[in-house]
Amino acid sequence: MAVLNTTKKYAIEGIWNNNPIFRQVLGLCSTLAITNLVSNTAVMCAALVFTLAFSSATVSYLRNITPRNIRIMVETLIIAFYVIIVDVILKAYWPQMSSNLGPYVGLIITNCIVLGRTEACALSNPPGGAFLDGFFNGLGYSYILLIVATFREVLGMGTFLGMPVPYFSSAYFDRWIMMVMPPGAFFMLAIVVWVFRTIQHNKEEKTK
């Protein structure tokens, strides 16, 4: 029961109460980089969840033997290790996706969500808790980006995961080309953040 309650606490915090995007407003560069296609976004999100969860657990495991004066360097090295694993696997088994994502997988190393969670949680919690914190924060980041990517691909290209969507892929719908351009990412992100913050605000008002 204690394990279940702990998992539930981390899930609620990472996915909703302290969501990395619409609460902390972190990692927004990804919305511009890879959310024009749902498939690219899904792979990028999976890579970040893997990196964030295992990096947090590893930093937590080594926290008592890591000298404070090189702490950030060690954390960056750990994050880079897991990012390289993802990058090598993609290049070996999915070269087309690796080519689609280009340098953005490597840029996970500089994603402020990853380093932020290792600093905020992994350094003060046991490996199990740090892993859960990283995993659920990664999921919180992922579902927001997938929502943005879905609207951008459907409205901008008339497809979902590369498959035509009825009406949106027909001649009756004038595709919103702006959605697959960089400004479309910011417009969609602003709308999604506004909707989720409004929902959260209304829930908080009801509990008062």
Image: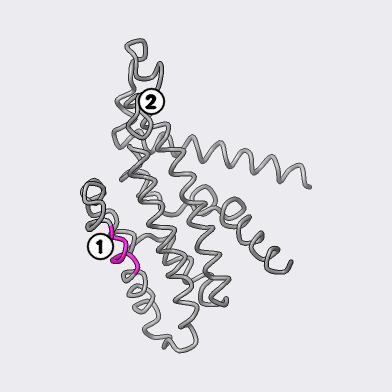
Front-most of residues 181 and 145 = 145
Question: In the picture provided, is 107 more to the left or to the right than 75?
Answer: left
- Residues at discs 2 and 1 in contact (Cβ within 8 Å): no
Instruction: Residue at 74%, 66% (x, y): give it.
Output: 1
Does the magenta-highlighted stretch encompass residue 88?
Answer: yes
| Number of marks in the rendered image | 2
Q: Secondary structure at mark 1?
A: helix
In percent of width and height, residue 121 lies at 54, 70
Does the magenta-highlighted stretch encompass residue 9?
Answer: no
Front-most of residues 180 and 92 = 92
Instruction: Residue at 57%, 77% (x, y): give it.
Output: 126
Q: CA distance from mark 2 to mark 1?
A: 33 Å
What's the magenta region? 82-89
Of the residues under marks 2 and 1, which one precedes in the sequence? 1
Query: What residue sits right under mark 2 in the picture?
Result: 155
Number of other residues with Cα within 10 Å of mark 1, as a class: few under 14, some 14 to 19, many 20 or more: some
Instruction: Residue at 45%, 89% (x, y): give it.
Output: 65
User: In the current view of this chain or complex, which residue is farthest to the right?
Assistant: 208
Three-letter amino acid code of the residue under disc 1? Val
Q: Which circle marks residue 88 in the picture?
A: 1
Front-most of residues 102 and 118 = 102
Please tell me whether residue 28 is drawn above or below residue 3 in the rendered image: above
Q: Which circle marks residue 102 in the picture?
A: none
Instruction: Residue at 77%, 46% (x, y): give it.
Output: 207
Three-letter amino acid code of the residue under disc 2? Leu
Number of other residues with Cα within 10 Å of mark 2, as a class: few under 14, some 14 to 19, many 20 or more: many
Q: Quadrant of residue 149?
A: top left
Q: Secondary structure at mark 2?
A: helix
